[in-house]
Amino acid sequence: MRRKLVVGNWKMHGSRPANAELLAALVAARPYGGDVAVCVPFVYIQETAATLAGSDLRWGAQDVSAHEQGAYTGEVSAAMLAECGCRYALVGHSERRAYHGESDALVAGKAQAALARGITPIVCVGETLEQRDAGETEAVVKRQLSVVIHQLAHCASEIVVAYEPVWAIGTGRTATPEQAQSVHALLRAQLQAATGHGERMRILYGGSVKADNAATLFAQPDIDGGLIGGASLKAADFIAICRAAN
Ligand code: PEP
């Protein structure tokens, strides 16, 4: 039985007072039925850690360097994130792939760097609208995931996967539960074939998940929770989504 996981991706939002209010509300609303985490901007990780320490809520980063250390101005290493108690790091979010030119190989390197420091990479995959319309969804997500699986080899079963159709992120257009389920099922089959542990691995759905559609999405057999952008910034909405994963 896979335990559900809901992860908030704050993206480049937040301020110290707003974060304090949001985190206090999340702590006060516990317990949730599944695991809950927030991936916050780097500069807020330490304060988030201080607020959530001692609770069962976890925190993480939205990116991580593929390099261990050195002259990589602006990068943050997995060792640094581990020092701040991060449980998770997003890798390969579509905004990083699109705006920062991240390749499948770089994403795989980041996943490997995270795992080497005991941080669970949440590997994001997903197709654009053009790719979906061209019937390429399956090929695209399988290619994105296979590069990571190949690089991680026997550690591949330690990742979390997030299926995030690019056309559903921040657009208000959610994949139907059936559309999402069918991609999740093929990703799980790929994970099972490659690692032998696909049945216990968690595959999250992301893309305009809201309080009113979360329960139906999370009820799908291969959807193990969500990666939540916009709705993770509003305490009431995020709490409702976390509860829907019960
Ligand atoms: C995301 O940023 O990963 C995301 C899914 O965003 P939203 O929920 O706003 O679509």
Image: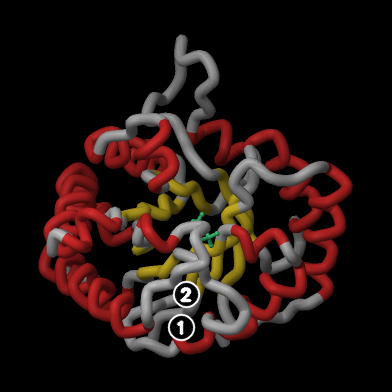
* Residue sitting nearer the eye, 123 or 131: 131
Name the residue located 43 percent from the left edge and 89 percent from the top edge: 219
- On the rendered structure, is 210 left or right of 167? right
Measure the C-alpha gap from mark 1 to mark 2: 6 Å
Location of the C terminus by quadrant is bottom right
Dot 1 and dot 2 residues touching (CB under 8 Å): yes
Q: Quadrant of residue 29?
A: bottom right
Pointer 1 residue:
218
Say what amino acid the circle numbered 1 marks. Phe
**SS type, badge 2:** strand
The number of numbered badges drawn on the structure is 2
Identity of the residue drawn at 74% across and 49% down: 48
Helix, strand or loop at label 1? It is helix
Residue 152 seen: yes
Residue drawn at (57%, 38%), measured in percent from left and top? 81
**Above or below: residue 88 compared with residue 102:** below
Q: Residues within 10 Å of mark 1 (few under 14, many from 20)?
A: many
Q: Is residue 27 left or right of residue 138?
A: right
Q: Position of residue 142 (x, y in %)?
A: 16, 58
Q: Is mark 1 within 8 Å of ligand 1?
A: no
Q: Position of residue 175 (x, y in %)?
A: 38, 73
| Residue with the mark numbered 2 | 225
Q: Please determine whether, in this image, residue 153 is positioned above or below residue 80.
A: below
Q: Is residue 56 shown left or right of residue 135?
A: right
Q: Is residue 45 left or right of residue 200?
A: right
Q: Earlier in the sequence, mark 1 or mark 2?
A: 1
